[in-house]
Amino acid sequence: NSVVHVATGEQYDVTIGKGLIGRVASFVPSLEKVSRVAVVTDDVVEGLFLGDVTDGLKRAGFEVSAFAFPAGEPSKNIHTFAAVLEHLAEHRMTRNDMVVALGGGVVGDVAGFAAASYMRGCPYVQVPTTMLAAVDSSVGGKTAINLQAGKNLAGAFYQPSAVVCDIDCIAALPSGEFANGMAESLKYGVLCDAGLFDDLGDNPRDHLQELIARCVNIKRRYVEADEHEGGLRKFLNLGHTFGHAIEKCSGYAVPHGSAVAIGMVMAARVSASRVMADQALVDRLARALESAGLPTSTDIPAEELAWAAQSDKKRSGDTVTFVLPKTIGNCELVDVGVAELGGVFETACQK
Ligand code: NAD
Ligand code: ZN
């Protein structure tokens, strides 16, 4: 297995390897006080992996319950969050008991936020089953739900006790879902690792364990340096101010990874218009995303996107911070006044 140690306030290991799903407990430290485990998942992952996970936890001696909600981003809301909390209470979970988030980023974000809130915080473990969750959302302790006004508007920073990534689950992903994870993986390449950017273009499914470990290691560095997003961690939002607006305007019909892919191309266009990068960068990025099976443009009008972006949580006071790529491997933070947002989105959407 590959192990990445994350040294945030609460420290934990990310273990990446084959055949881990049936023995999740063996990768979680200090389980002496845990007697009950609640596995939270969605109704697609339930049919694929829930049995293996619960069997393993029962063999390890825990009393296991499970809660599954309808798969998809629309479930990442306050009602699902409340239903998870009620499940934990009904099953008499205490602050010493443990939540297992089994699934993609939606499950991880909702279950993580529920674990952060239940009795002011109980331990939880991330078991990512999508590429996106493996390389990104399962690591770093950001948990959230969406509100009517926008993405991730309620949430908490709350680190897991462990992350257990079984690459057999990731290998089983349909191509569209795999592609969504490639968007966040390529993001790390654009941010700080041109070698990774190139390697991701070369049959990534054949090198899953190595590639996931490299991505997690990059995320680890940003998160360790800035756990609560005061500065450096903002770089991880490359493509996300545009992406969140696309997700919201599409009524969440465009998945997060695809929206981030389009958002990164938009960021590159804005960068080129400010002479921070050239058109060749825009083209190279778009080509890599297309080869990974991702979209690179949207028909949603620029004004609609700009309007949606105003309620994005990255708006602090009267400015929005954009991450703009200069080269593959180097980006810069640029603050834009809310009054300029319309112009930025206009440039970003010019094909
Ligand atoms: P998702 O959780 O909706 O999963 C996508 C689909 O794949 C779902 O239908 C799911 O049921 C299915 N699925 C999961 N595992 C599978 C498997 N092994 N085989 C077949 N199907 C499987 O979406 P996602 O792309 O994993 O995550 C996106 C979410 O993550 C967004 O809400 C985004 O905001 C969030 N996110 C959070 C962070 C963070 O730091 N917390 C970072 C990035 C993204
Ligand atoms: Zn993301």
Image (cartoon, helix red, strand yellow):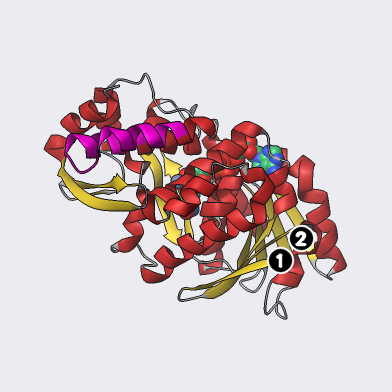
User: Does residue 301 appear to the left or right of 117 in the view shown?
Assistant: left
Q: Is residue 92 magenta?
A: no
Kindly report the secondary structure that dominates the magenta region of the rendered protein. Answer: helix
Question: Is the residue 273 above or below the residue 234 in the image?
Answer: above
- Residue appearing at x 71%, y 66% in the figure: 1
Task: Answer with the quarter of the image where residue 126 lies.
Answer: bottom right
Residue 319 percent across, percent down from the top left: 17, 47
Instruction: Tell me the tag on residue 1.
Output: 1
Look at the numbered disc 2 and say if its residue's Cβ is closer than 8 Å to ligand 1: no
Q: Residue at x 36, y 67 (%)?
A: 226
> Which comes sooner in the sequence, label 2 or label 1?
1
What is the span of residues highlighted in magenta in the rendered image? 265-287
Give the x, y percent position of residue 109: 53, 51
Q: Check the image and report above or below for 274 versus 33.
A: above
The residue under label 2 is 20
Amino acid type of the residue that numbered disc 1 sits on in the rendered structure: Asn
Q: Is residue 70 visible?
A: no
Residue 176 seen in render = yes
Q: Are marks 2 and 1 in contact (CB under 8 Å)?
A: yes
Q: Residue at x 27, y 32 (%)?
A: 279
Give how far apart the Cα atoms at labels 2 and 1 are: 9 Å
Q: Residues within 10 Å of mark 2 (few under 14, many from 20)?
A: many
Q: Position of residue 87 (x, y in %)?
A: 66, 53
Q: Is residue 292 above or below residue 123?
A: above
Residue 151 position by quadrant:
top left
**Res 273 quadrant in image:** top left
Q: Secondary structure at mark 2?
A: loop
